[in-house]
Image (spheres, rainbow, N blue to C red):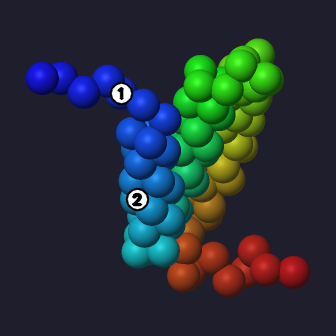
Amino acid sequence: MLEEVGLTHYLALGSFLFVSGLACMILKRNAIGALMGIELILNAAAVNFVAYSRFNPLFAVEGKIFAIVVVIMAAAETALALAIVLNFYNNHATVDVDNAKELKG
């Protein structure tokens, strides 16, 4: 028998995406890996917003609107961060975040 997919399944998926993104941000030493981790965390938030909008009638429209805002914010963050990473690569020939000490303060 197939079990119906409930809120718990979506929250488990969101938790898995969040932990994967957090691990990717902590373990990757280059900027592209860290950006991928941030995107996974934002996708986890979007999954949770949409899941709550489906299972909570008081949150029906707001959850979808928040998810769209998260996607728009992620696209803007990606464009800006990619421009910074490409500029850093052109100046230093690496995307290793440990070599980015001159960007501080």
* Of the pair 25 and 95, the residue shown nearer to us: 25
Residue situated in front as seen by the camera: 43 or 97: 43
The dot on residue 5 is: 1
N-terminal of the pair, mark 2 or mark 1, is: 1
> With 21 as the anchor, is 63 left or right in this view?
right
Provide residue 31's location: percent of width, then percent of height: 52, 62
| Residue identifier under label 2 | 20
Q: Give the residue drawn at x 18%, y 23%.
A: 2
Residue under the image location 41 percent in, 48 percent down: 12
Quarter placement of the C terminus = bottom right
Query: Mark 2: which secondary structure?
Result: helix
Q: Residue lying at the far front in this picture: please name it.
A: 1
Which quarter of the figure is the N terminus placed in?
top left
**Tag nearer the camera, 2 or 1:** 1
Q: Position of residue 67 (x, y in %)?
A: 67, 28
Are circles 2 and 1 on residues that touch, CB within 8 Å?
Answer: no
Q: Is residue 81 above or below residue 104?
A: above
81, above or below 88, in the image: above
Q: Position of residue 14 (x, y in %)?
A: 48, 46
Q: Is residue 88 above or below residue 46?
A: below
C-alpha span from label 2 to label 1? 22 Å
Where residue 49 is drawn, which disc sits there? Answer: none
Q: Does any portion of residue 32 appear in the rendered image?
A: no
64 versus 32 height, above or below: above
Amino acid type at circle 1 is Val
Per the image, label 1 sits on a secondary structure element best described as loop
Of all residues, the one furthest to the right in this rendering is 105
Q: Amino acid at mark 2?
A: Ser
